[in-house]
Image: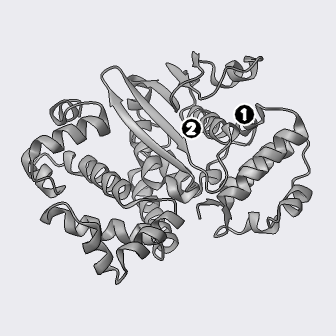
Amino acid sequence: MRTTSSSWALAIVHALEAEGIDCQALFAELGLSYAALHDPDARFPQDGMTRLWQRAVELSGNPAIGLNMVKVVRPASFNVVGYALMSSRTLKDGFARLVRYQRIIAEGADLSFRVLPDRYVLTLAIHGDSLPPTHQAAEASLAYTLTFVRWITGRPIRPLRVQLQGDAPADQQPYQVVFDAPLRFNAEGYALEFARADLEAPLPSANEALAQLHDRFAGDYLARFAGSRVTHQVRQILCRLLPQGEPKREVVAQELLLSERTLQRRLQEEGASFQQLLDDTRRELAGQYMAQPSLTLLEIAYLLGFADPSNFFRAFRRWFDCTPGEFRARG
């Protein structure tokens, strides 16, 4: 079951209350604990947050209610991740941390950060559990993130383009006001596209010592939160086995003292699959290895468990929309 942090849930509640919604009554209706919003370690079920958005739209009659998140921007809403982003050297470094620690904020959201020749692209995908996700949840995340980076930079950063799924609403004015950028509806996914100069400029709040401290806090939180989850354990085993070749599911199951069928079932319960975890782990490690100039591309391919380097090059292009050589050349 995917969960959302109490800090992000509280920000959503503040945004909905700005619309005049009685969230205390709404939480009681949905079987959610309103008091737990102020417990920093509390987590809320993904489906519960989905129902919250659905009822908020019904009660308010405002399908763009997710954009209200821009009214409640504060670092704590992103948990420790907000402070880690603020203390980063640049927004480029900050977004890398945001992607790395996204699961702390909400497990139902997947972020990726791509480097293109003329821009950076932060892409968001929202996943549901038994209920399909709402577009309000995704729009809230994009609107909040953009407003947050404008706040910490002190500059009115204007995206090159904002991509949104679904049909264009009859009234686009609220979206134009919040994003102040070209909008593309009916897109394949949700994304913010930025000029390279905007994300490479030094942040006024940059502090390397604090950034490292926040990294440690975030790492400790993830370890405490994810340690008992099968997905986390599988990732750890994959990281250890990959240099020996592509790990097989039956080998990982044996390491966990589980049958293959039980491993598959428990991964499904956590909204994951073995093949997706393998691909995600390879992608994350690839980004880390590419930052080490001492490693050759051939060595990286083998460290990621690719017996044939050509398979590594194909996978890398799929992950990052460029070749490994181009990736390194961009720094």
The residue singled out by tag 1 in the image is 67
Q: In front here: 128 or 5?
A: 128
Disc 2, SS: helix
Quadrant for the C terminus, please.
top left
Q: Is residue 157 above or below residue 69?
A: above
Mark 1 to mark 2 CA distance (whole Å) = 19 Å
165 to the left or right of 261: right
Where residue 216 sits: x, y (%)?
42, 65
Where residue 177 sits: x, y (%)?
71, 20
Q: Is residue 171 above or below residue 98?
A: above
Q: Residue at x 89, y 58 (%)?
A: 24
322 to the left or right of 275: left
Q: Is residue 264 visible?
A: yes
Q: Residue at x 29, y 79 (%)?
A: 255
Query: Quarter-wise, where is residue 277 in the image?
Result: bottom left
| Pointers 1 and 2 in contact (C-beta within 8 Å) | no
Disc 1, SS: helix
Q: Is residue 87 visible?
A: no
Q: Which mark is residue 152?
A: 2
305 to the left or right of 78: left
271 to the left or right of 20: left
Q: Nearer the viewer, mark 1 or mark 2?
A: 1
Q: In front here: 199 or 308?
A: 308
Query: Quarter-wise, where is residue 223 in the image?
Result: bottom left
Where residue 2 sits: x, y (%)?
58, 61
